[in-house]
Amino acid sequence: MEMRGGGLGCEGWFDLKNEISTEKPLLKRVMRFFEETVLEVKRSTWPDRQTLVMHTVIVIAGVFALGIYVGLSDKIVAVFLRLLVPQG
């Protein structure tokens, strides 16, 4: 038997066209999607408040540091370009 999907865990993906048939009403397919989404969200593991706050602070600090780095890099390149290109 030929293995489709290269053994990467997507073997069942090729059978989705049979599962999601255009014969089923659109409303039923949309409702099924939302039901499965709610089930998946309930199965997820959510961080506690302390972890969430800590990671949020890390992300905000990282964005702030990256903004400073990009701003300083832009100013340095602008100074070098003014030195290299004569104003006339």
Image: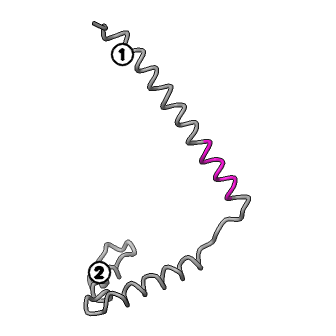
Q: Nearer the viewer, residue 13 or 7?
A: 13
Q: Position of residue 79 (x, y in %)?
A: 42, 15
Identify whether 77 is placed above or below 17: above
Instruction: Look at the image and name its color scheme.
Output: one colour
Give the residues drawn in magenta, as a range: 52-61
Spatial CA span between label 1 and label 2? 55 Å
Amino acid type, callout 1: Leu
Residue that label 1 marks: 81
Identify whether 60 is placed above or below 6: above
Disc sitting over residue 14 in the figure: 2
Q: Are marks 1 and 2 in contact (CB under 8 Å)?
A: no
Amino acid type, callout 2: Phe
Question: What residue do we see at 26% from left, 82% from top?
Answer: 2
Q: Nearer the viewer, mark 1 or mark 2?
A: 1
Question: What residue do we see at 37% from left, 90% from top?
Answer: 28
Q: Position of residue 36 (x, y in %)?
A: 48, 83
